[in-house]
Image (cartoon, helix red, strand yellow):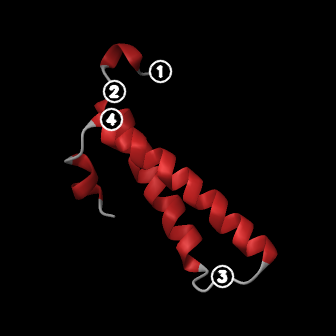
Amino acid sequence: MEAKELRELSAEDLVQKRASLREEIGNLKLKRATSRLENPMKLQETKRDLARVETILREKAPEGQRG
């Protein structure tokens, strides 16, 4: 998912997206440990998406909550 698309989402949607990405990363790590992943790059892409979401959430946070 591109940062441009993520910036259009509300903060609540981004929080939900972050939770689903964390869950997906956990599932991918479990699959990797127990068997082979069909697409090994999927884990890396998901981690990058999570980082994008967290960055945008930090940008949207009010000044008083940063730090």
Cβ atoms at labels 2 and 1 below 8 Å apart? no
Which marked residue is nearer to the observer: mark 1 or mark 4? 4
Q: Earlier in the sequence, mark 4 or mark 3?
A: 4
Among the 4 quarters of the image, the one containing residue 56: top left
- Alpha-carbon span between mark 2 and mark 1: 10 Å
Would you call the spot at circle 2 few (<14 residues within 10 Å), some (14-19), or many (20 or more)? few
Query: Can you say whether 8 is above or below 45 in the image?
Result: above
Disc 2: which residue: 61
Disc 4: which residue: 12
Q: Earlier in the sequence, mark 2 or mark 3?
A: 3
- Alpha-carbon span between mark 4 and mark 3: 31 Å
User: Of helix, strand and loop, which one carries label 2?
Assistant: loop
Which marked residue is nearer to the observer: mark 1 or mark 3? 3
Q: Position of residue 47 (x, y in %)?
A: 54, 60
Q: Earlier in the sequence, mark 2 or mark 1?
A: 2
Disc 1: which residue: 67
Disc 3: which residue: 37
Would you call the spot at circle 3 few (<14 residues within 10 Å), some (14-19), or many (20 or more)? some
Q: Residue at x 70, y 65 (%)?
A: 29
